[in-house]
Image (cartoon, grey):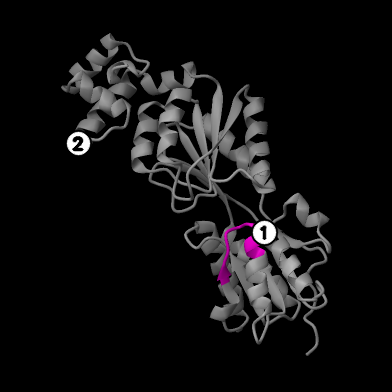
C-alpha cells in the first residue's frame, strides 16, 4: 500500500493540505506517519493544516472506542491496580481498553508504533515509561493523545502525566522508622534511572538529614521492583558486619523478598528487623506480619489518567498531576532490638 494511502484522509484532502502548506503530497504523508526527512518548519506548517482540516478531531471521533494501555511489564498486582482504575473511568464513558506489553522504562519498543497506528486507539496511556519525540510526532499527527502514569523520567514537553508524591512517600516511611528509634536504616530502591526511585531515595535522605543521622552508602542498594531482587539485596544487607535494624523497601514486592531474606537469616520481623514497603498492594495486608507501607493511590492514578486522556485538549497546556501518598501502619516495624 503506498504511504499516502495508508492514512484515513482522502487524496483530495491530502492535495488541499499539501497545496495550503506549499509542499508535496508525499511530504504530508511523511508528517502523518512521523517519518524523518522533513524540516521542523515544514512539519509545523503541515501539522497546522492537518489541524485546520479537522484531522485531529476526526481521529478522536471516528476511531474504534479503545484506550491503549502500555506496560513495560504486566506481571504484578501493581499493574492490575492501574488497569482497574483505567478501566473504571473508560467504562463510565463507553470506552474499552486494550493492554499492550512493550519496550522498557525509556519507552515502548520500535515495533509498537506501527501496531498502534493500525489499532488507531482514541488515546494511549503509558505506564512507568516515556515516549520518544519520533513516536510523539507520529501519534500527534494521527490525533492520538498520550498520558503517562508514573513517568520514568521528566515527561517530554506537551505530554500529560499522572504521578504520586514519591519524595513525600520516602520521607514519611523513613521518619516512621526514625520515630521508632532506628538509626541503622537501609533502603532498597528501584531502578536508578526511574524518577520515582530517585524521588523516594531523596525523601529517605532528607529524613535522615533532618534527624542528624549520617547516610551510609553501604545501606543504599538499587533493585528492580521485583521480589527476587528484594531477596538478593536483603541478604546482602543482612550479611553486613553492622547490619541494619530496619529496611525501607521502595515497593511491596521487594519488601516481601526482604521478609524471605530475614527468614533465611533466622531473624524475626519486627523483633529483629523492621521492614517498611511502598505501594500498599493487597499482598501487604496478607503478609506475615502485615506490612507497614506507603500507600500509593494506584487505582486513582489509573482512573485519573483515563479521565485526563478522554478530556484532553490537544491545543491546551498538558496537565500534570501528583496524587498524595500516606503511611499505612501495620505490624512489620517496631522499636529496634536492644544491643
- Residue toward you, 202 or 316: 202
Instruction: Identify the image quadrant of the N terminus.
Output: top left
Q: Quadrant of residue 21?
A: top left
Residue named by callout 2:
39
- Hey, which residue is sitting farthest front in the picture? 264
- Residue toward you, 317 or 194: 194
- Which of the two labelled residues, at mark 2 and mark 1, occupies the earlier sequence position? 2
> Which residue is found at the position 57% from the left and 61% from the top?
190
> Which residue is found at the position 42% from the left and 43% from the top?
131
Q: At numbered mark 1, what does the secondary structure look like: helix, strand or loop? A: helix
Residue named by callout 1:
227
> Which residue is found at the position 48% from the left and 19% from the top?
63
- Residue toward you, 194 or 224: 224
Residue 227 is a magenta residue:
yes
Position of 169 relative to 24 (above/below): below
Position of 332 relative to 1 (above/below): below
Q: Quadrant of residue 218?
A: bottom right
Q: At numbered mark 2, what does the secondary structure look like: helix, strand or loop? A: loop
- Hey, which residue is sitting farthest left in the picture? 22
Position of 62 relative to 231 (above/below): above
Q: Position of residue 76 (x, y in %)?
A: 66, 47
State how far apart marks 2 and 1 are (Cα): 47 Å
> Which residue is found at the position 66% from the left and 86% from the top?
242
In the picture, measured across the screen, residue 320 lies left or right of residue 229, that is left
Position of 203 relative to 144 (above/below): below
Q: Position of residue 156 (x, y in %)?
A: 39, 46
Q: Residues within 10 Å of mark 1 (few under 14, many from 20)?
A: some
What segment is highlighted magenta in the picture?
Answer: 221-230
Q: Position of residue 110 (x, y in %)?
A: 40, 39
In the picture, measured across the screen, residue 223 lies left or right of residue 327, that is left
Amino acid at each position: 500500500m503506498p504511504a499516502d494511502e495508508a492514512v484515513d484522509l482522502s487524496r483530495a484532502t491530502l492535495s488541499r493540505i499539501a497545496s495550503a502548506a506549499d509542499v508535496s503530497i508525499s511530504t504530508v504523508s511523511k508528517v502523518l506517519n512521523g517519518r524523518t526527512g522533513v524540516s521542523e518548519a515544514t512539519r509545523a506548517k503541515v501539522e497546522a493544516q492537518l489541524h485546520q482540516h479537522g484531522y485531529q478531531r476526526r481521529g478522536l471521533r471516528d476511531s474504534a472506542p479503545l484506550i491503549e494501555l502500555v506496560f513495560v511489564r504486566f506481571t504484578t498486582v501493581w499493574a492490575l491496580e492501574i488497569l482497574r482504575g483505567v478501566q473504571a473511568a473508560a467504562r463510565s464513558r463507553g470506552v474499552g481498553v486494550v493492554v499492550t506489553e512493550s519496550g522498557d522504562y525509556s519507552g515502548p519498543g520500535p515495533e509498537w508504533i506501527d501496531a498502534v497506528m493500525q489499532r488507531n486507539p482514541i488515546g494511549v496511556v503509558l505506564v512507568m515509561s516515556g515516549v520518544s519525540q519520533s513516536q510523539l510526532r507520529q501519534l500527534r499527527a494521527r490525533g492520538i493523545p498520550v498520558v503517562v502514569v508514573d513517568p520514568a523520567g521528566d515527561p517530554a514537553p506537551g505530554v500529560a502525566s499522572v504521578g504520586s508524591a514519591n519524595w513525600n512517600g520516602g520521607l514519611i516511611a523513613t521518619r516512621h522508622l526514625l520515630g521508632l528509634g532506628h538509626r541503622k536504616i537501609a533502603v532498597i530502591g528501584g531502578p536508578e534511572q526511574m524518577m520515582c526511585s530517585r524521588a523516594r531515595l531523596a525523601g529517605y535522605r532528607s529524613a535522615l538529614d533532618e534527624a542528624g543521622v549520617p547516610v551510609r552508602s553501604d545501606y543504599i542498594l538499587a533493585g528492580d521492583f521485583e521480589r527476587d531482587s528484594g531477596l538478593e539485596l536483603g541478604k546482602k544487607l543482612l550479611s553486613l558486619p553492622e547490619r541494619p535494624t530496619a529496611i525501607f523497601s521502595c515497593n511491596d514486592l521487594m519488601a516481601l523478598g526482604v521478609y524471605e531474606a530475614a527468614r533465611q537469616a533466622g531473624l524475626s520481623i519486627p523483633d529483629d528487623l523492621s521492614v517498611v514497603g511502598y505501594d500498599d498492594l493487597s499482598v501487604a495486608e496478607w503478609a506475615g506480619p502485615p506490612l507497614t507501607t506507603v500507600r500509593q493511590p494506584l487505582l486513582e492514578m489509573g482512573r485519573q489518567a483515563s479521565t485526563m486522556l478522554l478530556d484532553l485538549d490537544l491545543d491546551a497546556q498538558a496537565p500534570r498531576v501528583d496524587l498524595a501518598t500516606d503511611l499505612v501502619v501495620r505490624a512489620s516495624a517496631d522499636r529496634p532490638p536492644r544491643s
